[in-house]
Amino acid sequence: MASLHLEAEIGEIAETVLMPGDPLRAKHVAETLLTDAVCYNRVRGMFGFTGYYEGKRVSIQGSGMGMGSAGIYVNELITTYQVKKIIRVGTCGAIQRDLDLGRVVIAMSASGDSDANSHHFKGMHYAATADFDLLYAAVEAAKKLGIPTVQGPIFSTNTFYDTESNRWDVWERHGILGVEMESQILFTLAKRFNVKALSILTVSDNILTGAASGQKEREQSYNDMMRIALEIA
Ligand code: HPA
């Protein structure tokens, strides 16, 4: 049996899934960091692989961009494949001036502008939060690995391009570290279905200053983030 958007057989997906936005990143990570990796999904090019990291069985599944896409995969992973732990690994644009490019951000909560969330909560505002045990484990793992991190709230948007110049002012003033496009729906669905979720992100750019990291810095910080995620998988 498969779900609507995933062709894996039941049992082919591990209980723990790392979830990058980019399916080609999923493929790259599976090929370089996992052993005995097997591809279980090619539908829509949204690659998913299951393999082993230091003896631990782990899957890595692309989510696509935005909460519409990510919500579909998160839903199906949990409800069809009984996944118990989902760790998003991705990038964010900083909206704090002093947040360094390449810094690893461990998200405590995700505010956002998703219609899916406002519909579901009848216009009220659900505070989508990460799983505390995973968050704690990630902070401890980062310390052990000597990787500096920042913990705090982030914002998930469904609109990457926007013409409003002061769009982030109020969020900056309320301590939001950075903006990405998937975590709010991930955290909400994980709580709905009683599984664990976390997002670990690297700062790829600063929306306020326009600074953007180069390819080499990006690779380095992506590797740091992956080491933390695999350590707690
Ligand atoms: N907006 C939304 N998502 C992002 C950004 C951004 O500026 N940078 C990295 N992910």
Image (cartoon, rainbow, N blue to C red):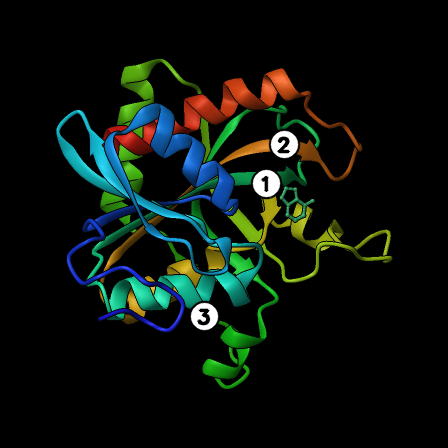
Q: Nearer the viewer, residue 152 or 57?
A: 57
Above or below, comparing residue 123 to residue 198 in the picture:
below
- Amino acid tagged 2: Ser
Horizontal side, residue 221 vs residue 74: left or right: right
Write down the residue under mark 1: 92
| Residue positioned most to the top | 146
Residue 183 visible in the shown view: yes
- Spatial CA distance of label 1 from label 2 is 6 Å
Mark 1 near mark 3, Cβ–Cβ under 8 Å? no
- Residue 224 image point, x, y percent: 42, 22
**Residue 189 occupies which quadrant of the picture?**
bottom left
Q: Earlier in the sequence, mark 1 or mark 3?
A: 1
Residue under label 3: 126
For disc 2, the marked residue is 204
Residue 30 rendering spot, x and y as whole percentages: 35, 33
Which residue is at 57% across, 69% downward? 114
Measuring 40% from the left and 18% from the top, which residue is drawn there? 147
Q: Quadrant of the C terminus?
A: top left
